[in-house]
Image (spheres, rainbow, N blue to C red):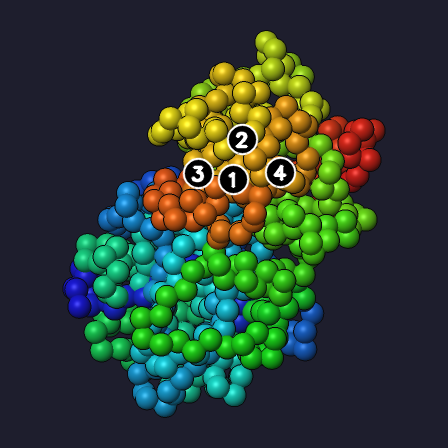
């Protein structure tokens, strides 16, 4: 096992997790309320500390009314290495997770794993990734479908399904090794020590000369606290051979102590709330089968998200719609994007899959789906005022290169888009180029001669990457046909799949899907991370009255394709 620098905790074994929200607490809390312990914050050398993650802060009234006073946290600046949120070239974000109990009193635990994905400058609602039965000291890998700054949540249970602890950690720029250490009596003493850091070579140990994070979480009365220090309890019981000695002062990633989504400065938050997914509220094994972890087990996060979608998303999210049947050709594309909070339905429970999509609506969807560098300066569109509901999305996706002006400095936000408009925007924004003969690639389409010359290479590039979806005739592009909400959903999902963000959806209407599945690993190397700022309203596919007031989320007169819906209302 590699050695790490003493200041960053030497001899750290490696195992990783990503983060999400909701929490718990235990008997030690009152000592921290008056002690004023300081917390070391491992500062990153980039600007990622500006973009913080939020643990879901919803409050649900339960039997306990115990409150925990806010802790005093002092931030110390430390020089750290290679912990940027920018992914290391050639490295894929993922984590390995190990559970320890040094006294030997416990032989197995159940780890309930979930994720809070970072989208723009906020976190999405917590999604269930499964229940895993661990032998102590065992580790498992979680790969694909994660990105730096996502947060992973782990709730631990004993084999009698008693809740024994909570932890949360942040996915790093490369593979992360995560260790959770339990006390000798976890049912009575619900404290967990979390030790993690980058494990780029995936050998199970935190890499030398990189930052190691080391901190404690404590549960009391169904609330969790992220502790500033280990001084008020016997820290030696959390010592594991091969890991560095417990430090007096906790070391947290900056996003846990600073900004809107800090966890350490919260007085407490609940481990369970009424908004949580069914699978996160159920007793282990009652709703979803517990997975037995074997040595070197590996799990595909993007596939887990899809597998558990029906029971694994927040109760406040709608992923099934009254007008999208179980046999609808685009059902899975629509449902998964809804689970990812990229699009939503209407208050009447419908999705309106055959409705058109406007330029403003598509801009809002792109802003939520992708994070890219800005390739050009924003311009002041004459027909998009600063009060327009999609003002920010339009500016941002223009800067990222997805959508252009229509005439002069007009954006024409209410204009419906054709299928070729959608495809060209995706190809330009993702900077996809064809690597083969354009005519040869396009020969799959029976109407290839109808594709305008200036768009042929772009369509070929998308076809190569499996982004084109044609229903009902897979060989008919219908380039100039007005795009429907269902079609846009399919295009967008396949574009995300081309970047390695999401799992494959098998569909007979994806052009060349068999070829695409063979090449998927190569495509994931060009992964485009999602991020970017979210505006106040109407940012799904066609979910907004075009006159929405971004500040108050009120429709001003309603548009001809929205029925005057009030954005965000269900």
Query: SS class of the residue under badge 3?
Result: loop
> Which badge, 3 or 2, is on the more N-terminal residue?
2
Between the residue at mark 3 and the residue at mark 4, the CA separation in whole angstroms equals: 19 Å
> Which badge, 1 or 2, is on the more N-terminal residue?
2
> Which badge, 3 or 4, is on the more N-terminal residue?
3
The residue wearing badge 4 is 473
Residue drawn 80% across and 28% down?
A: 560
Whether 460 is drawn above or below 521: the answer is: above
Which image quadrant is residue 404 in? top right
Query: SS class of the residue under badge 1?
Result: loop
Disc number at residue 445?
2
> Which badge, 4 or 1, is on the more N-terminal residue?
4
Between the residue at mark 4 and the residue at mark 1, the CA separation in whole angstroms equals: 10 Å
Query: SS class of the residue under badge 2?
Result: loop
Q: Position of residue 546 (x, y in %)?
A: 73, 29
Residue drawn 69% across and 69% down?
A: 61
The residue wearing badge 3 is 465
- Could you tell me if the residues under marks 2 and 4 are in contact, i.e. CB atoms within 8 Å? no
Disc number at residue 356?
none
Closer to the observer: label 3 or label 1? 1
Front residue of 24/154: it is: 154
- Could you tell me if the residues under marks 4 and 1 are in contact, i.e. CB atoms within 8 Å? no
Residue drawn 28% across and 78% down?
A: 239
Closer to the observer: label 1 or label 2? 2
Which image quadrant is residue 181 in? bottom left
Front residue of 507/21: it is: 507
Between the residue at mark 3 and the residue at mark 2, the CA separation in whole angstroms equals: 15 Å
Q: Position of residue 141 (x, y in %)?
A: 36, 65
Q: Position of residue 427 (x, y in %)?
A: 47, 29
- Could you tell me if the residues under marks 3 and 1 are in contact, i.e. CB atoms within 8 Å? no
The residue wearing badge 1 is 511
């Amino acid at each position: 096992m590699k050695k790490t620098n003493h200041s960053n905790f030497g001899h750290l074994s490696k195992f990783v997790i990503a983060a999400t929200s909701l929490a718990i607490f235990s008997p030690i809390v009152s000592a921290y309320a008056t002690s004023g312990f300081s917390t070391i914050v491992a500062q990153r050398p980039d600007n990622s500390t500006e973009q913080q993650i939020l643990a879901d802060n919803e409050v649900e009234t339960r039997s306990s009314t115990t409150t925990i006073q806010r802790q005093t946290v002092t931030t110390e600046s430390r020089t750290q290495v290679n912990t940027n949120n920018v992914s290391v070239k050639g490295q894929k974000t993922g984590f390995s997770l190990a559970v320890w109990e040094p006294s030997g009193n416990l032989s197995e635990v159940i780890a309930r794993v979930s994720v809070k994905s970072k989208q723009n400058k906020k976190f999405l609602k917590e999604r269930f990734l499964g229940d895993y039965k661990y032998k102590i000291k065992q580790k498992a890998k979680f790969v694909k479908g994660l990105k730096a700054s996502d947060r992973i949540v782990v709730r631990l249970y004993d084999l009698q399904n008693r809740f024994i602890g909570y932890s949360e950690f942040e996915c790093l720029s490369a593979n992360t090794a995560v260790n959770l250490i339990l006390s000798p009596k976890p049912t009575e003493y619900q404290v967990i020590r979390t030790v993690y850091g980058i494990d780029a070579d995936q050998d199970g140990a935190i890499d030398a000369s990189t930052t190691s994070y080391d901190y404690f979480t404590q549960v009391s009365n169904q609330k969790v606290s992220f502790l500033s220090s280990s001084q008020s309890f016997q820290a030696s019981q959390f010592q594991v051979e091969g890991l560095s000695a417990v430090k007096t002062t906790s070391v947290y990633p900056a996003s846990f102590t600073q900004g809107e989504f800090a966890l350490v400065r919260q007085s407490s938050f609940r481990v369970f709330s009424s908004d949580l997914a069914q699978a996160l509220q159920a007793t282990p094994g009652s709703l979803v089968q517990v997975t037995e972890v074997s040595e070197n087990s590996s799990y595909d996060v993007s596939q887990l998200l899809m597998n558990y979608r029906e029971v694994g998303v927040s109760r406040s999210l709608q992923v099934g719609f009254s007008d999208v049947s179980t046999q609808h050709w685009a059902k899975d594309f629509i449902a998964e994007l809804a689970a990812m909070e990229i699009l939503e339905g209407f208050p009447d429970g419908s999705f309106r899959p055959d409705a058109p999509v406007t330029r403003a609506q598509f801009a809002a969807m792109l802003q939520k789906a992708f994070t890219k560098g800005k390739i050009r300066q924003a311009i002041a569109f004459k027909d998009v005022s600063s009060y327009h509901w999609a003002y920010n999305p339009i500016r941002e996706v223009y800067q990222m290169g997805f959508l252009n002006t229509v005439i002069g400095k007009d954006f024409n936000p209410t204009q419906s888009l054709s299928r070729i408009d959608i495809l060209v925007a995706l190809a330009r924004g993702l900077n996809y180029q064809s690597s083969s003969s354009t005519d040869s690639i396009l020969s799959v389409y029976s109407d290839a001669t109808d594709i305008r010359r200036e768009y042929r290479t772009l369509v070929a590039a998308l076809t190569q990457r499996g982004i084109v979806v044609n229903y009902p005739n897979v060989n008919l592009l219908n380039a100039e046909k007005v795009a429907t909400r269902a079609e846009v959903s399919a295009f967008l999902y396949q574009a995300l799949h081309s970047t390695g963000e999401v799992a494959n959806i098998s569909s007979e209407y994806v052009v060349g899907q068999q070829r695409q599945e063979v090449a998927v690993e190569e495509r994931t190397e060009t992964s485009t991370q999602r991020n970017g700022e979210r505006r106040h309203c109407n940012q799904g596919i066609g979910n907004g009255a075009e006159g929405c007031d971004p500040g108050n989320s009120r429709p001003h007169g309603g548009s001809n394709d929205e029925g005057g819906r009030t954005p965000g209302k269900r």
